[in-house]
Every structure is written in C-alpha cells, then in structure tokens.
Amino acid sequence: MRSGGFAMSKYRIAWLPGDGIGNDVMEAARVVLDAVELDAEYVHGDIGWEFWCREGDALPVRTVHLLKTVDAALFGAVTSKPVKAAEAELAPELKRRGFTYRSPIVRMRQLFDLFVCLRPTKAYPGNPLNHKEGIDLVVFRENTEDLYAGVEFGPVPHELATTLKRLAPPFAPFADLPADEYAVSCKINTKRGSERIVRAAFEFAKLHGRRKVTVVHKANVVRATDGLFLEEARKVAKDFAQIQMDDANVDAVCMWLVKNPLAYDVLVAPNLYGDIISDLCAQMVGGLGFGCSGNIGQKLAVFEPTHGSAPKYAGQHKVNPIATILAAKMMLDWLGEREKAQRIELAVSEVIKDGWVRTYDMGGTGSTREMGKAIAAAVGETKPVGVGRR
Ligand SMILES: NC(=O)c1ccc[n+]([C@@H]2O[C@H](COP(=O)([O-])OP(=O)(O)OC[C@H]3O[C@@H](n4cnc5c(N)ncnc54)[C@H](O)[C@@H]3O)[C@@H](O)[C@H]2O)c1
C-alpha cells in the first residue's frame, strides 16, 4: 500500500490504452479486472500516435515519469509508421526540428530494461482456432539486444566499411559497393543479456514444474552471437539439474512446432528468433486475439496483447479482447495475485469452451464488450447471458 493520509489502493497500475483498438480491448479488460476486485488505482498514461503528431513524442516524458511510480502497467496498442510517413504527420510547427519517430514500446523496453518478453501460448479447450488441442508452451524472448539493438547503418559510413574490410574477410564481396547501395544492422548479444534471459526461463520452468527448456538459435551459421548465447545457456542449465535442456536451430524449431507442438515446453531465444517463434506459437492457439505478453524487468513490468492498433476496426468494439484479458491475468500473476489470476484464466477458459460469445475472429458475432462482460460474469461465477451467439 502506498503512503498517504487516506486509504490508498494496494497497487498503482499505469493504464496505457494507446491507439485504435487498444482503447476497445482495454475497456473490456477493465470490466474483468473490476470483476475480480483488484485493489488498484489505474492511472491513465498518454502514449501513441496522437502524441507523436502533437508533441513529437509517442512516449511523452510525463508517461515515463508515471511508469517510475507504478507497480505494473497494462498497455493496449499503438500505431507506428516508418520514419518518413511519421515525419509527414508531425504538427507543422514541429517539422524539421529534429524529431524522429521511435516506437514507444521498444523505448519502454530499453528505458526500463524490460529484458524478458514472456509469451505464454495455451490452447484453451474448445477454441475453434486451435491448431491442436493440448498446446501449452511458454516462450522467453530476450527483449533488449540482438538485431533489435538499434545499431544500424544505411548508407554505410566509409569508416565502418574500411574497418570491416580490414577485419572481416567475408566482407570482401561488399567492400567496393557505394555507401548507399547496402545497409548494415548489427546483431549484438552479450553474455549478461544471454545469461539472464536463459536463467529466467529455467527459473520459470522450476517454479511451474515444467520439464524442458529448448534453446533456440542458429549457432551453426551465426557463430559469434548465437554461439555465445548457446554457450551461456549451457552454463545456466548446469544449475538446474532437474530440468532437461535441449537446443535447436530456429528454422527447424518453426517446422517442428507446427508438426508436433506438444513436444515443446519452455523455449528461450535471442530477440529476433523469439519474436518470430512467439508469433508462430500465438497463431497455433488462435492468433492475434489470443497472443499476450509481459515485458518484464527488475523494477517494472508492462503487459500487453501482442496485436497492433488495427485502425480499420478502431472504436467498432468488434475485435477479440481475450489477448488483453490474458495480459491482465499475467499482470496479476506478476503482482503475486495468483488466486485472482487463476479466476480470470478459468473464466476465459469457460467462456471459450462454452462458446456462447465469440468475436468475429472465432467465427461469431459477439462484440468486444460482450466478450469482456461474459468473462467478467464467469469470474463472478454467474453464467453469461446469451449475447453474440453464433
Ligand atoms: N504492440 C503494438 O502496439 C503493435 C504491434 C503490432 C503492430 N502495431 C501497429 O499497429 C498498426 C496496425 O498494424 P497491423 O494492421 O499490421 O497489425 P494489427 O495487429 O493491428 O492488425 C492486423 C489485423 O489482425 C486482426 N486483429 C488484430 N487484433 C485483433 C484482435 N484483438 N481480435 C481480432 N482480430 C485482430 C485484424 O484483422 C487486423 O486488421 C500499425 O501502425 C503497426 O505498426 C503495433
């Protein structure tokens, strides 16, 4: 409980709906959080496209300050556009003043060192979108390094080209290209970054009685960086004798995940491979309406659905809020509110199995609000009324 002269809530949560359907799905998630009676103060934070256009910053400083004062954050979605398109939509008085669009979610990850991207993937029984029943995987994606470190060059500076020519024989075929004929993105993986994400995966496996951690890489080709990741993983595995570790190339994992998802349990990967396999996993259990994630650091965690702002559906209350409701459930787990988290998950599971409310992606006509209310009703152990019936 935070200090003050009057009764304060147990938790302070940053509430970041963002753009487009971010608002629709967050509204539904709030109905469910209220149904479990989480003792929380929800503090709205400005984030997204509107603030880029108006202020030149999609993550305004006041929101960064807010994030420093909260126990956790729930985030909807934002609209992002390539640099030139973003510049074109900037308020006229801000143009040509050196503002550069940067993704607010990537910035939150970097500013608060949210190094774990946790992506649970569960096939809830009866979901018509399940690739196979029984899938229950958890992906740990490293969230701050690798090809997403942001060290990129295009056009390539002469100094860099000269150095690469001198130090890296495989650079020879590119060495004489004009600077604007190619680009270089640096994949940077550290021992510390690799060690801590793999350790987080093993700790999770231990805590939740999982049997195996699969390390995903491409160390046979990308030898320096993925080799380092794999080596650190092998060291960490020695501290968890009761948990099996195996490793596999990312391409093979993609194929095997589709073929035999039940053979996997916890997967851990550097940033880019983690990004790819977690979307693949999400699609096996229902796609964007079901994919949720936690961006977790030592001091702050930001939970979100993995989908974007889907502008074409903005404000229509048509999309599936289950991903956001499951993100809220993850937030409760992280806060230590296990019983409430479990109640939400059971309610989601019951509504999916029951099938009375299904949003369009599940083949139904139910609205975002109807789905939120049905899950909230199931949380309160009241049968949902027959809205949005198939
Ligand atoms: N984390 C984020 O905030 C995030 C993630 C991805 C994309 N984006 C941004 O969102 C904007 C739109 O991107 P996009 O259209 O490529 O991806 P998107 O995820 O917003 O939507 C793609 C399509 O998926 C479906 N969809 C998405 N969410 C759904 C849900 N909850 N229920 C049912 N169907 C759903 C819709 O058909 C939608 O048109 C872009 O500006 C993009 O940069 C943001």
Image (cartoon, rainbow, N blue to C red):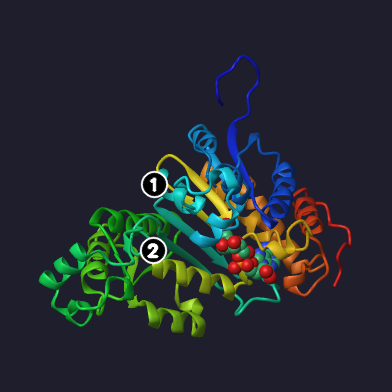
On the image, the x and y values in percent for residue 283 come to 58, 74
Residue at image coords 71%, 39%: 37
Name the spot of residue 306 as percent of width and height, x first. Answer: 57, 61
Q: Secondary structure at mark 1?
A: loop
According to the picture, the residue beneath numbered tag 1 turns out to be 113
| Residue at which label 2 appears | 271
- Quarter of the image for residue 364 reads bottom right
Q: Is mark 2 within 8 Å of ligand 1?
A: no
Residue density around tag 1, few if under 14, some if 14–19, many if 20 or more, within 10 Å: some
Task: Relative to 153, say whether 89 is above or below.
Answer: above
Q: Amino acid at mark 2?
A: Asn
Name the residue located 53 percent from the left edge and 40 percent from the top edge: 60
Task: List the single residue furthest toward the top.
Answer: 5
- Real-space Cα distance between discs 1 and 2? 14 Å
Q: Within 10 angstroms of label 2, few (less than 14), some, or many (20 or more) residues?
A: many
Q: Which mark is residue 343?
A: none
Q: Nearer the viewer, residue 74 or 1?
A: 74
Q: Residue 333: in sight, yes or no?
A: yes
Q: Pick out the residue farthest to the left.
A: 166
Instruction: Specify the quarter for ligand 1.
Output: bottom right
Q: Nearer the viewer, residue 294 or 348?
A: 294
Say which of 356 and 99 sits in front: 99
Amino acid on which the number 1 mark rests in the picture: Asp
- Above or below, 221 against 236 in this view is below
Residue at the spot 37% in from the left edge and 77% down from the top edge:
250
Q: Looking at the image, is mark 1 or mark 2 earlier in the sequence?
A: 1
